[in-house]
Amino acid sequence: MTSGSNQPDHTDPVADPGTVNKMETEWKRVIDQPAEHLTITNARSPAGTLTITVTGDLDRETMTKFRRHLAGVVDGHRDGDLDLNLSAVDFCDLAGLRTLQALDQATDGHHQVRITAASPAVDALLQLCRIPTLLAYTPSTSPHEH
């Protein structure tokens, strides 16, 4: 309310129904569209090995980005091996696992693709799915081995 008046003060966001509606709409948009939590970096060693480091989630929401990145790397990297560092993966679901399995099956003989490190989340998924080895990586049997 403005001083000396019974009229609502429209500069107060709580008193302005338009502002409240805009805030509700923005909040709903944020909730309905979760952020993709995935970062992928590449580093090439002097010997020609390309290390792809993945940070974040390997799940249904991030698979398109991950697959595109891998396809671009595999197409552009004809010599040397590809190492996947998954030690900073916070979450991996079956979509992530299927993508890794597809990469394992798609190796064309030009280079070896291997997982060089994995997080407890990746290890747990491999153990739950009873996958003893994937891309030359064997999950630890104890969470304390990392």
Image (tube, rainbow, N blue to C red):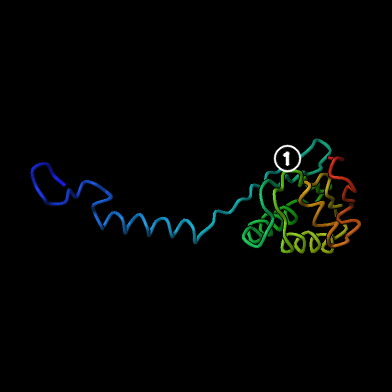
User: What amino acid does circle 1 point to?
Assistant: Ala
Figure label count = 1
Q: Which of 74/5 is in front?
A: 5
132 sits left or right of 78 in the view: right
Q: Which of 118/101 is in front?
A: 118
Q: Position of residue 105 (x, y in %)?
A: 84, 64
Q: Secondary structure at mark 1?
A: strand
Q: Residues within 10 Å of mark 1 (few under 14, many from 20)?
A: few
**Quadrant of res 28:** bottom left
Q: Which of 122/16 is in front?
A: 16
Which residue occupies the extreme left position in the image?
4
Q: Position of residue 49 (x, y in %)?
A: 81, 43
Q: Which of 96/12 is in front?
A: 12
Q: Position of residue 56 (x, y in %)?
A: 66, 48
140 sits left or right of 56 in the view: right
Residue occupying the point 31% across, 55% down:
20
Q: Quadrant of the C terminus?
A: top right
Which residue lies under the disc numbered 1?
43
61 sits left or right of 135 in the view: left
135 versus 105 height, above or below: above
